Amino acid sequence: MTPVPHATSTAPGTAIADTAALLDDLRAIGEDLPGFDLPADRDPAKVWSERKLDYRLVSPLNRRKFTVIVVGTGLAGAGCAAALGELGYRVEAFTFHDAPRRAHSVAAQGGINAARARKVDNDSLARFVKDTVKGGDFRGREADAWRLGEESIRVIDHMEAIGAPFAREYGGQLATRSFGGVQVSRTYYTRGQTGQQLQVAASQALLRQVAAGTVTLHTRSEMLDLIVSDGRAQGIVVRDLLTGRIRPVTAHAVVLATGGYGNVYFKSTLAKNSNVTAAFRAHRRGAHFANPCLIQFHPTALPVSSPWQSKTILMSESLRNDGRIWVPVEPGDPRPANDIPEAERDYYLERRYPAFGNLTPRDVASRAARDEIVAGRGVGPLKNSVYLDFADAIARVGKKVITERYGNLFEMYTDATGEDPYTEPMRIAPGAHFAMGGLWSDYDLMTSIPGLFVGGEAGWGYHGANRLGANSLLSACVDGWFTLPFSVPNHLATLLGSDRLALDDPAVTEAVRRTEDGVRALLEIGGSQGPDRFHRRLGELLYDKCGVSRSGPELAAGIEQVRAIREEFWSDLRVEGRPDGFNQEIERAGRVADYLDMAELMCLDALDRDESCGAHFRTEHQTPQGEAQRDDVHWRFASAWERMADGRYRRHQEPLNFVSVPLQTRDYR
């Protein structure tokens, strides 16, 4: 974890005019990664079932001979651990929470998609794939989208069977609603608590296996390093957050399901403890990191109201089913929202995108809101938000119906702002949210390190350059319940007869020593600033240089400024207390150290990707209408970054081919 000097000729403080020279200084170009071509003569809907048929199996009597580590107990991690335990494998599950129930999956409130086509609105599996691939701006793997859609059909039944209480219509069928980027109704929900209810169900399934003795659950334990021996992942190093004890755990395979890295922006919609450390430590050990610049800014976050605010709050996208988004026509209009007459309001999404209106995809809606705010039509005390208005919906269907659909969200808004959304419009603004980037994995969810698997938001799969609403819970469930329980045994089958790595193996003792040195290095700096000060400055820098929109010169300056903060961090960090015992300052310091390197990689990837796509909007590349302008000739691939020993990066590419959803310009008008 100690800083690695970068072999660069760019001196700190030097104005960077030539971004190409900077890129050459920072990164090299590596070979292509094996993609997953979908032959034109092959039915894409059969690819996943054919792949499952090809997987090697482990007989029931041999399963107990294998141990699998699962890090993270959100929807992906809990599902994977519970499923592997049910199959008979020995599972060691780790979480830094005091209970799996507290994983951040609870925060995804709006719903979960499924291509079940139960309504007569012309939905289908093929349409789900089309919406997902198009919504991701053709920067995701098409075959992954097909698996996501195919498995979505049984995810709903599975989650309901283990306890998720989905909403129902009068006739008894499961109710659905719409989310951004689609024109059909395929989102299943449990009022405004979908993530919470799914997480409760998954946690119960996990704890059932704990009671059965197949899963050993380790709470308040944080992964700080990955053990790699003989070229494959064979264990992790964890720190007990209560005692400070650092110890190794070995296994035949390791699964990381540790969530996304949106908290690198400091003010984000994520829980404060969500972090990138486990994924980035694996990256340092050799796992490629894919598309790190692809970060989603959610259009319905609550606006920042104070510079000392620690995070932002997310209001579900489902609110856009009934809420109308608008700003005053007159910039700087000081009147309260209800005093502004209809003729002086601009429902800009409905005006600019009449076909999708308020249900445009998140990247489009976020950029449009940003444009209105920058143009001076922002509302609220800091003029940094837009209105989300339910007056028309309440007049149309009544307050009772709106309360049934979104009541807890309205209560949450009132608790956070002191305002009543039933009588005056909500105020919303784009906020850092979901990471489409993550550890690169192949179609089997195995990273570039054999034996290391990744699931959920910690990986890069499915979403391309922009995630459609309600596909997050779905991808976590599909990975955890229906992909990893097949693909991990496929790897284990090759290891039959091999023992777990011994705890006195040199690879293990070296990983433990490295981890202990890293913790000690943070304590010995003896500076004057706590880790949160650096994190806050880093977040403000990223919002400015690598936010809703980016440009080459801004990103180049951002890289230089990230380096300057990192240099200051490693010379002036103050961490109070001792390493042996409960010490949250050490926890935060280690995570901020990883965020600093992560931020540089994000800026590098954004600078390198010289096009606009989805949530990655380079101001140099936009259409005359202000939309993102892709460059499919030069950038139709996923970037997978390898970190080299000197701290520089090598970019590998996985070419992306689209057979069932031909390349097209996204148009939501």
Image (spheres, helix red, strand yellow):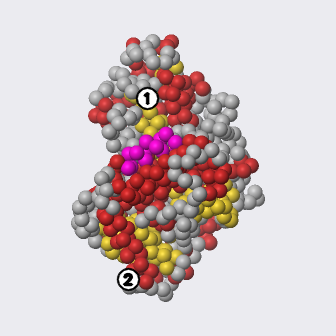
Is residue 545 inside the magenta stretch? Answer: yes
Predominant SS along the magenta part: helix
The x, y position of residue 620, in whole percent, is: 65, 38
Of 250 and 559, nearer the camera is 559
> Looking at the picture, does residue 147 appear above or below residue 427?
below
C-alpha span from label 2 to label 1: 54 Å
Q: Is residue 270 visible?
A: no
Is residue 567 inside the magenta stretch? Answer: no
The residue that label 1 is drawn on is: 385
> Looking at the picture, does residue 166 appear above or below residue 512?
above
Badge 2 vs badge 1, beta-carbon distance below 8 Å:
no
Of 577 and 488, nearer the camera is 577
> Is residue 50 toward the left or the right of residue 513 in the image?
right
Q: Is residue 540 visible?
A: yes
When asked about the image quadrant of residue 576, the answer is bottom left
- Residue positioned 49% across, 39% down in the render: 544
Q: Which of the numbered marks, if any, corresponds to residue 224?
A: none
> Is residue 466 toward the left or the right of residue 324 in the image?
right
- Residue positioned 65% across, 52% down in the render: 21
Question: In the rendered structure, which amino acid carries the disc numbered 1?
Answer: Ser
The x, y position of residue 75, in whole percent, is: 41, 57
Question: In the rendered structure, which amino acid carries the disc numbered 2?
Answer: Leu
The residue that label 2 is drawn on is: 503
When asked about the image quadrant of residue 217, the answer is bottom left
Q: Residues within 10 Å of mark 1 (few under 14, many from 20)?
A: many
Q: Quadrant of the C terminus?
A: top right
Of 17 and 432, nearer the camera is 17
The x, y position of residue 100, in whole percent, is: 33, 59
- Residue positioned 34% across, 50% down in the render: 532
- Span of residues in magenta: 534-546
When asked about the image quadrant of residue 356, the answer is top right
